[in-house]
Amino acid sequence: MKQLLAPLLLAMAIALPAHAQLLASAASPSQPLDRIVAVVDEEVILQSELDQAMASVQQQYAGQPGQLPPKAVLERQVLNRLVLMKLQVQKALEQGIRVSDQDIDQAVASVAAQNRLTPDQLRMEVIRSGTSYNAFRHQLGDQLTVQRLQQSVVQSQVTVTDSEINNLLSSPSYKTGEVHLAHIQISIPSGADAEAIRASAEKASKALDAIHGGMDFNAAAIRYSDASDALEGGDLGWRRLDEIPPAFADTLSTLKPGEVSTALRGPTGFHILKLIDQRQPSQQIVTEFHARQILIKPSELVTPAQAEQKAHDLYTRIVDKHEDFAKLAKEDSDDDTTANAGGDMDWFPLKAWGETVARQLSSLKDNEVSQPFQSEAGWHILQRLGTRESDQTVEIQRSEARQAIGNRKAEQVYDDFLRDLRSNAYVEVVAPELRDPDAPADGVAP
């Protein structure tokens, strides 16, 4: 159970707000007062925040302590993430982004379900881990806030056209398949001069030398990487090759699983890639269903009870009186997309019409008519007409290409946003031992 919760608690601790720790300190007068370790615009990061985040990282790597860098280096990595989280929450609040208690309740339920727990059991596990449950909820709220900030930034700037999809699929450089990657990113500050770029290049060279000298790649990522996933060893998981910038994909094509690239210059800095594994795509055969439906919606003139009764009356006319389904659909169905076609929904993948319809469809035999059932749209009567196996390789390829282009654009847009956010913020590391050796002597970040 602790292993299941460790990554979540790590992320939660990284997002811990200062006031939660202040309340904890106030509750126990015998404890020494926190000290401020960093100032982020008009807010502060406390030693207790850093300590809790450090403890969570160390707990996550309890079975592999050799993966972690020296304490001083790890503290700077964790502090950098705390700073970035605080800046994002501040920006989200400035833009009016808020989350409600109900949103947090849903997030708690989702986390509990992922860990095969009830919400009450999750609460007990959080408390048993040494974390305040109120702080845990507040941390979840911060994460939801940052997610909504990211969505807001990306949605307003990322679009994908059919022409872009066609160009990608027809490009000689287009590559199919998937790769499991890890990376180390050495960032170049926004507006950096030649000296700053040279310093980043030297840091990337040090990381490569450490890897070639026998340091595990994940340990090197924790020690050297500036990416948000550094504390997870830089693991990017499985990525489609069409999601990866072409220059990086070309480099990966020359690597074998387990091999590491040179330091590659990208728009935001230097990148070192490790190819963990790779796999080729297969033909995509999908089971499609053919069905028809009658939908009765409640309205200002039709109460929910009347809609339910009408659906049951129509079911009786179809099943007991053998009236024509298509004729009744044309006359009575409130589904504008299928009524004129006699309720015909055409061929579609199982979940194309939602989970509720999919469950009913799976339980029917061909030509069988369902009992009336309710979804968010209203009351349905469904008749399954048949199934077939369909080669969706081309359609899925286009869908994946659209997603890949969108993901690539979104990552670039948000990475640029974070770099600008960090560059324009006032960040002062107050604790001398936590300052980056390459940072200005006064501890103020550029």
Image (spheres, grey):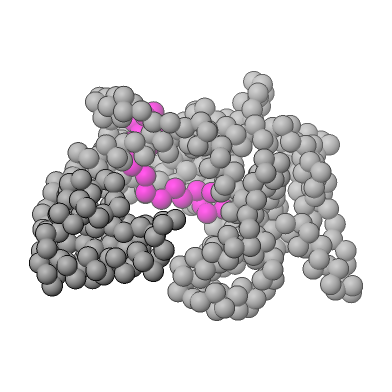
Estimate the x, y position of residue 83 in percent, counting from the top left. Answer: 70, 46
Q: How many marks?
A: 0
Start and end of the magenta stretch?
229-250
Quarter assignment of residue 188 = top right
Q: Is residue 437 visible?
A: yes
Look at the image and say whether residue 238 sits in the magenta stretch: yes
Relative horizontal placement of residue 115, taking residue 379 as reference (left or right): right
Q: Is residue 12 above or below residue 145?
A: below
Seen at 21% across and 62% down, the residue is 382
Which residue occupies 69% across, 53% down? Answer: 75
Q: Residue at x 57, y 78 (%)?
A: 120
- Closer to the camera, 376 or 135? 376
260 sits to left or right of 27? left
Kindly give the residue lying farthest to the front in the view shown: 301
Q: Is residue 316 left or right of residue 232?
A: left
Looking at this view, is 152 or 440 the one in front?
152
Is residue 143 depicted above or below 90 in this figure?
below
Q: Residue at x 44, y 48 (%)?
A: 236
Q: Position of residue 366 (x, y in %)?
A: 10, 64
How far across and how far down the image is residue 284, in percent?
A: 19, 48
Q: Quadrant of residue 368?
A: bottom left
Relative height, residue 414 to residue 196 (above, below): below
Quadrant the C terminus occupies? top right
Can residue 230 be seen in the rendering of this structure? no
- Magenta stretch holds residue 230: yes
State the image coordinates of residue 148 (x, y, percent, origin top left). 57, 47
The single residue placed furthest to the top in the displayed view is 194
